[in-house]
C-alpha cells in the first residue's frame, strides 16, 4: 500500500474513532457541566487535570523507543511487547501510589475556598485507578501502531468510552454526587484495557507468557528517559495554568477555563493521530532522504492547512458554548484565544516527531524544560491579576516558543533553510 494511503487510512481511522470518543466526551462534558454547574465542573477540572499528569508519567514515551527496537529486530516483537507491558504495569502502579500520596498534600485554603478541596482530593483517589487501565491501553497501542491497525485501538476506546457514558447516565438519573459519577470513568477504563488486550491477541496471535528481562527494562528506561522527561515537561506547561488558577482564583474561574480548554483539546487530536500514523514510516524511511523529505513536506502543508481550518471553525462556533448553560458565557473568550494558537500546536507536533525519529530526545528535553520554566514564570506573574485570560494567552505564547525552537532544529537537522517550507530538497 502506498505511503500516502497508509498514513491517510490510519489517520482517518483515528479521526473516526476520535469522532466517537469525542462525541462521548462532548456529551459527558455537557452532562457534568449542566448537572453540577460551573463550580462542580471546576472541581471536575481540578481532578482530571491532576490525573492527566500521571497518565503521561506512566506513559513516559516508552512506546516510541520500543517501536524503534521492534523495527530493528522485528522477530522479537512479542518479546519486546510483553516486557513493555510488564514494565508499564509495575511502573503505573508506582505512579498511582505517587498520585494519591501527592494529592494528600495539595494546598487548600478553607477561608477563600481556593486550592484542592477535600472533594477534589477524594475524586483524585477514585480516578487514580484509571492510571493503570490507561497504561495497559497505551501499551496495546504499540502493536496497533506498529501494524498500522488503529481500527483495533478505536474499537477498544469506543467500547470503553460508550460504556462509561452509559454508567454515568444511570448515576445521574439517580442524582448521585460528583464523586460517585467518577466511577463511570473507572469502569470505562477497565473495559477499554480488557478489550485492547483481547484485540492484541486476536491481531497477532500472541500468547501472554511474559519472560521478565530486567536488563531490557533498564535499557528501555534509560533510552526513554530524555523523551519521557520531555513529555512530562510538555504536559506540565500544558496543565500548570489550571493548577495556578486553582491556587490563586476561585473554583468558578477554574470551571470557566476548564470548559474552554476541554473544547480546545478536541482539534489537538488531529496532529496527534496524524503523527501516530506517520512515525513508523519516518523510522522505516529515515535513511532514504529524498523519500522522507517528501513525506515531511506534505505533512507540513497538510498540518498547516488543517490548523487554519480549525481556527476558523472554533472562532465561528465559540458562541455555542453558552448553550450548555448561560453561566458558561465567560468561556467563549478564552476559547477564542486558545484557538488562535492551534497552528503552533499542529506544526510543533511534526517537528517534535522529526527530532524523535532522528534520536534527538535530549534536545527536545532541553527545549521543553526551558518552555516549561518560562510558562510557569509567566503564569505565576499574570494569573493572580488577570486570571484565565492570561492563562489562555500564555498557552499560545509557550507553544509558539516550542514551534520556533523545534522548527529551527528540524531545519538544521535536515540541512535546510526556510525555503524548506515551500520547496524541500535535501542537500547531498
Image: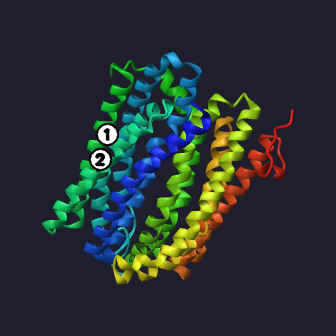
**Looking at the image, is mark 1 or mark 2 earlier in the sequence?**
2
Residue 365 visible in the shown view: no
Q: Secondary structure at mark 1?
A: helix
Q: Is residue 177 left or right of residue 302?
A: left
Name the residue rendered at 47%, 72% in the picture: 245
Residue at 79% over, 52% down: 422
Callout 1 crowding tier (Cα within 10 Å): few <14, some 14–19, many ≥20? many
Front-most of residues 394 and 17: 17
Pick whichever, 336 or 374, lies toward us.
336
**Looking at the picture, does residue 330 appear above or below residue 206?**
below
Q: Quadrant of the C terminus?
A: top right
Of the 4 image quadrants, the one containing the N terminus is top right
Q: Quadrant of residue 48?
A: bottom left
Establish if 304 lies above or below 411. Answer: below
- Per the image, label 2 sits on a secondary structure element best described as helix
User: Looking at the picture, how far across and down is residue 112, in whole percent?
Assistant: 37, 81
The answer to whether residue 306 is seen in the rendering is: yes
| Mark 1 vs 2: CB contact within 8 A | yes
Residue at x 34% of width, y 42% of height: 155
Q: Nearer the viewer, mark 1 or mark 2?
A: 2
Across and down, in percent, residue 65 comes to 56, 32
- Image spot of residue 72 (x, y percent): 59, 21
* 415 up-or-down from 15: above or below: above
- Disc 2 target residue: 160
Amino acid at each position: 500500500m502506498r505511503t500516502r494511503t497508509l498514513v491517510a487510512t490510519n489517520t482517518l481511522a483515528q479521526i473516526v474513532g476520535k469522532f466517537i470518543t469525542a462525541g462521548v466526551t462532548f456529551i459527558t462534558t455537557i452532562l457534568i457541566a449542566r448537572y453540577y454547574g460551573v463550580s462542580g465542573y471546576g472541581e471536575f477540572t481540578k481532578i482530571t487535570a491532576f490525573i492527566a499528569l500521571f497518565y503521561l508519567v506512566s506513559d513516559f514515551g516508552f512506546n516510541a523507543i520500543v517501536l524503534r527496537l521492534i523495527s530493528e529486530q522485528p522477530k522479537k516483537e512479542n518479546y519486546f511487547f510483553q516486557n513493555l507491558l510488564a514494565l508499564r504495569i509495575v511502573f503505573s502502579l508506582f505512579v498511582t501510589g505517587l498520585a494519591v500520596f501527592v494529592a494528600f498534600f495539595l494546598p487548600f485554603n478553607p477561608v477563600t475556598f481556593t486550592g484542592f478541596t477535600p472533594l477534589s482530593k477524594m475524586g483524585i483517589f477514585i480516578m487514580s485507578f484509571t492510571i493503570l487501565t490507561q497504561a495497559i491501553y497505551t501499551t496495546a497501542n504499540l502493536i496497533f501502531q506498529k501494524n498500522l491497525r488503529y481500527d483495533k485501538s478505536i474499537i477498544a476506546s469506543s467500547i470503553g468510552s460508550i460504556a462509561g457514558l452509559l454508567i454515568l447516565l444511570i448515576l445521574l438519573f439517580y442524582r448521585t454526587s460528583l464523586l460517585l459519577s467518577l466511577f463511570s470513568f473507572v469502569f470505562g477504563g477497565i473495559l477499554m484495557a480488557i478489550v485492547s488486550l483481547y484485540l492484541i491477541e486476536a491481531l497477532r496471535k500472541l500468547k501472554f507468557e511474559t519472560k521478565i528481562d530486567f536488563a531490557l527494562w533498564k535499557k528501555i528506561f534509560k533510552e526513554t528517559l530524555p523523551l519521557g522527561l520531555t513529555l512530562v515537561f510538555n504536559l506540565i506547561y500544558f496543565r500548570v495554568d489550571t493548577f495556578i488558577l486553582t491556587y490563586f482564583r476561585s473554583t468558578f474561574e477554574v470551571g470557566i477555563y476548564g470548559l474552554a480548554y476541554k473544547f480546545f483539546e478536541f482539534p489537538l487530536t488531529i496532529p496527534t493521530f496524524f503523527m501516530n500514523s506517520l512515525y513508523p514510516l519516518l523510522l522505516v524511511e529515515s535513511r532514504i532522504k529524498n523519500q522522507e523529505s517528501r513525506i515531511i513536506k506534505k505533512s507540513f502543508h497538510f498540518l498547516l492547512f488543517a490548523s487554519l481550518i480549525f481556527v476558523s471553525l472554533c472562532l465561528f462556533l465559540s458562541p455555542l458554548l453558552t448553550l450548555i448553560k448561560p453561566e458558561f458565557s465567560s468561556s467563549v473568550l478564552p476559547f477564542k484565544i486558545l484557538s488562535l494558537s492551534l497552528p503552533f500546536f499542529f506544526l510543533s507536533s511534526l517537528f517534535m516527531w522529526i527530532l524523535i525519529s532522528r534520536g534527538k530526545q535530549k534536545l527536545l528535553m532541553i527545549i521543553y524544560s526551558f518552555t516549561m520554566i518560562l510558562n510557569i514564570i509567566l503564569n505565576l506573574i499574570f494569573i493572580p491579576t488577570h486570571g484565565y485570560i492570561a492563562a489562555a494567552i500564555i498557552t499560545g505564547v509557550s507553544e509558539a516558543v516550542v514551534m520556533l525552537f523545534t522548527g529551527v532544529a528540524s531545519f538544521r537537522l535536515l540541512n535546510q533553510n526556510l525555503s524548506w517550507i515551500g520547496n524541500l530538497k535535501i542537500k547531498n
